[in-house]
């Protein structure tokens, strides 16, 4: 019996010192100033430029997306998802653009671009997918919070989507190391130590708006934000709402109301109840990404 | 929280509520001030007044700098981040918050953070953000809950492409073009600020001219300035349909067949009173057909111990008039004389250029007195106007038919909201128009326009006297 139990135990992970060394290696890489960070795919950038052109030709946009196979697949998958409820299957990019509109397409392209560039790694597919869902889920909730509070939803979406970008980026750095370990709690803790800093560096490198950088840096510690404290706090609240949705708690209101971020945002119980009514709709939308 | 009843329970801590609370406290009353937001001062101030004035100030600084274009080149980048254009905002907001909180604390006012609901005409339940609640009893209740942007069902304000005056300042970047629906105070303020920043602004309204409540010459002066820095006004057009095209533009179709489009749209057609959660019926009150509360000249509602002040009773809905209403309501409740008459309260519109008014407009004066004497002074005639490059200004003095006393004054031009106080003092102290001639102002200042205006009124008076003397001789 004892032997059987031992046989099913997972192999022991690396010792604690390993993670300290790993953390030190990440710090060294950051401090070297030569951190390798991805660029946004050219195709995504081009689609953005085209989509903001009033005279943009749909055929041209479709052609541009077609040049990036991953992007094209992502767009078609989302266009056919429940969130966009197509009456019939969408099989061409031109159909997808007509159905979604260029702006929605832009959001999808942006999402797909981030997913392909930042939130993917062959070695760590499962945690990357989890980080991605947290980003998109927070973005969807941040949008709803912004609507409720009469704030700009465009900014809220971007802040939500990228708030945790430091986590996949740190994991990517680890993945590039020779002795990259399996993903577990200890590794997750190491990632947590560096994610904010790495996210900040990426924000600078991509020249993201200051508000987005603040949300990346301070979403877990919004009290410390000198500027954009409200936006950072809103992202925190969005993450809490997302977590409450995934926990399948039938009535998470009491728990949420005890969180400092909801007090800070001045969300009254009836406002929260209204927000929570969106849970199933947002869960459906999240599924589509 | 004490169970003892308060002399005044004041709901809302904006300019009207603050002044009501301070007035009551100064008279030795026990005052509770309920605010639903975390900060005292009123959400309108935090979401609108202060941020928009900060943006306005920065736009003006950029414009002033660009006047020296032989020495420096100043140009706002297309899609410039909004936060770069609103520097110092947080410091201004924090300092305002501290100032108000200190002032209320010094006066011994009990500030309570929560949402107020009437249980009956004298009892107000306060629900905190965490859901707990308390009940306050007030001998008098003052409703000063302010207003929020109106959002009619047929205008899909999504705070993303079609914005209202709350969400417009949280845009990430300065848009390339903007449609402004409406031509009232808020619409004109934002339209002129964004136009000065280089945004292609088109303002649309069903009225023939912007700021239609002003005398036509002042409205025309504003429109002239707005168009001079690239704005466009489309009057006599009502939006019949507005939507985001799903690609890159907001499209607005007008009832006259015109179609306009822009990167963003700002819907600024009116505000609605914040009364939803007040439970007015329990207090024996209801809103009228315009969605606001009825109150008399002393801000007393039909329930005698309940007063309503500020935006909840509608126009003029300016901070200055709201402050006066707050003070007036409390004085009336305490049986004290109300003080200065309401018509001597100035109104300031922070368009670019500024507009200010006190007393009667020319149209109002003519309606009340028949013939009146009017003097108009162009700022281009004033040395300071030339020096400061403020040549698009106009000061208009309206005096009684005899040309002796000032009835009102309107000013359009930078500095108008400060300059108007001279006219206010003359009105309050019932000074003859001659006071502006008999006293010397600093030179060069824009106040010189008063002297020029007064001389013009006196000249009309003398001419009229000469004519009547001549008529008597004949």
Image (cartoon, coloured by chain):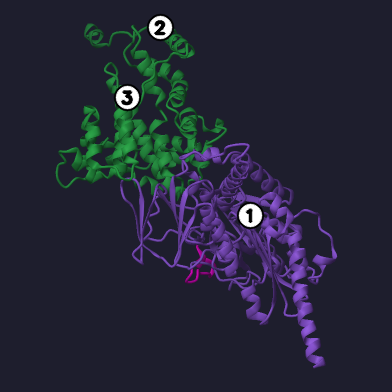
Chain colours: A green, B purple
- Judged from the image, the secondary structure of the residue bearing numbered disc 3 is helix
The residue that mark 3 highlights is: A117
- Judged from the image, the secondary structure of the residue bearing numbered disc 1 is strand
Front of the two marks 2 and 3: 3
Choose between A259 and B132: the one closer to the eye: A259
- Left or right of A8 in this view: B222: right
Q: x%, y% of residue B26?
A: 76, 58
Q: x%, y% of residue B273?
A: 51, 62
Residue A130 lies, with reference to residue B452, above or below; the image says above
- For the question of whether residue A161 can be seen, the reply is yes
How much space separates mark 2 and mark 3, taking CA atoms? 28 Å
- Left or right of B268 in this view: A172: left
Let me know if residue B289 is in the magenta part. Answer: yes
Please give the name of the residue rendered at 70% of the width and 54% of the height, measured from the top-left corner.
B385
Front of the two marks 3 and 1: 3
The residue that mark 2 highlights is: A18
Q: Which residues are magenta?
A: B279-290
Chain under callout 1: B
Residue A214, labelled with which disc?
A: none
Front of the two marks 1 and 2: 2
The image quadrant that residue B243 belongs to is bottom left
């Amino acid at each position: 019996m004892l032997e059987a139990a031992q046989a099913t135990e997972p192999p022991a992970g690396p010792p604690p010192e390993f993670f300290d060394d790993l953390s030190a290696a990440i710090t060294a890489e950051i401090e070297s100033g030569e951190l390798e960070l991805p660029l946004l795919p050219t195709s995504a950038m081009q689609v953005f430029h085209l989509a903001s052109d009033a005279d943009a030709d749909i055929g041209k946009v479709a052609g541009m997306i077609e040049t990036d196979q991953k992007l094209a697949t992502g767009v078609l998958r989302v266009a056919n998802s429940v969130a966009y409820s197509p009456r019939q299957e969408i099989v061409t990019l031109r159909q997808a653009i007509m159905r979604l509109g260029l702006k929605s397409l832009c959001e999808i392209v942006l999402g797909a671009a981030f997913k392909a560039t930042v939130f993917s790694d062959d070695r760590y597919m499962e945690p990357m997918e989890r980080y991605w869902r947290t980003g998109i889920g927070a973005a969807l909730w941040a949008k709803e919070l912004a609507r409720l509070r009469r704030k700009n939803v465009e900014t809220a979406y971007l802040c939500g989507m990228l708030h945790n970008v430091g986590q996949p980026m740190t994991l990517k750095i680890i993945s590039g190391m020779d002795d990259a370990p399996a993903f577990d709690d200890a590794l997750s803790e190491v990632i947590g130590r560096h994610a904010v800093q790495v996210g900040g560096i990426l924000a600078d490198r991509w020249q993201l708006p200051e508000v987005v950088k603040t949300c990346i840096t301070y979403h877990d510690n919004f009290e410390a934000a000198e500027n954009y404290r409200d936006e950072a706090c809103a992202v925190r609240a969005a993450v809490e709402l997302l977590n409450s949705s995934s926990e399948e708690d039938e009535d998470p209101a009491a728990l949420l109301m005890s969180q400092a971020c909801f007090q800070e945002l001045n969300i009254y119980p009836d406002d929260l109840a209204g927000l929570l009514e969106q849970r199933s709709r947002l869960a459906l939308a999240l599924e589509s990404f | 929280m004490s169970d003892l009843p308060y002399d005044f329970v004041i709901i809302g801590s904006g300019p009207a509520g603050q002044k009501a609370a301070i007035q009551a406290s100064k008279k030795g009353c026990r005052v509770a001030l309920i605010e639903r937001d975390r900060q005292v001062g009123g959400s309108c101030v935090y979401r609108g007044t202060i941020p928009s004035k900060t943006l306005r100030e920065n736009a003006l600084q950029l414009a002033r700098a660009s006047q020296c274009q032989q020495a420096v080149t100043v140009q706002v980048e297309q899609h410039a981040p909004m936060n770069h254009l609103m520097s110092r905002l947080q410091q201004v907001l924090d300092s305002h918050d501290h100032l108000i909180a200190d002032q209320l604390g010094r006066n011994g006012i009990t500030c309570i953070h929560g949402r107020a609901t009437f249980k009956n005409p004298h009892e107000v339940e306060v629900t905190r953000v965490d859901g707990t609640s308390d009940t306050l009893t007030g001998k008098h209740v003052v409703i000063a809950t302010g207003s929020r942007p109106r959002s009619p069902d047929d205008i899909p304000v999504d705070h993303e492409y079609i914005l209202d005056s709350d969400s417009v300042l949280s845009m990430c970047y300065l848009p390339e073009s903007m449609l402004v629906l409406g031509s009232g105070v808020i619409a004109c303020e934002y339209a002129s600020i964004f136009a000065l920043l280089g945004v292609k602004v088109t303002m649309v309204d069903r009225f023939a001219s912007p700021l239609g409540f002003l005398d036509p010459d002042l409205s025309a002066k504003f429109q002239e300035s707005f168009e001079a820095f690239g704005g466009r006004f489309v009057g006599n057009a009502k939006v019949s349909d507005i939507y985001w095209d799903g690609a890159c533009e907001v499209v607005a179709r007008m009832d006259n067949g015109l179609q306009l489009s822009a990167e963003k749209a700002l819907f600024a057609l009116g505000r609605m009173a914040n009364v939803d959660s007040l439970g007015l019926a329990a207090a024996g009150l209801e809103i009228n057909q315009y969605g606001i509360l009825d109150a008399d000249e002393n801000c007393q509602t039909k329930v005698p111990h309940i007063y309503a002040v500020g935006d909840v009773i509608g126009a003029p809905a300016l901070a200055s008039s709201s402050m006066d209403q707050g003070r007036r309501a409390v004085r009336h409740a305490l049986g004290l004389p109300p003080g200065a008459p309401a018509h001597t309260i100035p109104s300031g519109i922070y368009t670019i250029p500024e507009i200010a008014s006190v007393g009667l407009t020319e149209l109002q004066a003519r309606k009340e007195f028949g013939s009146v004497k009017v003097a108009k002074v162009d700022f281009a005639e004033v040395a300071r106007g030339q020096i400061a490059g403020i040549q698009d200004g106009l000061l208009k003095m309206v005096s009684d038919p005899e040309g002796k006393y000032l009835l009102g004054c309107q000013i359009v031009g930078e500095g108008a909201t400060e300059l108007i106080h001279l006219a206010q003092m003359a009105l309050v102290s019932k000074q003859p128009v001659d006071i502006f001639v008999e006293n010397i102002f600093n030179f060069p200042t824009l106040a010189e326009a008063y002297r020029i205006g007064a001389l013009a009124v006196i000249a009309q008076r003398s001419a009229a006297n000469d004519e009547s003397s001549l008529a008597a001789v004949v």
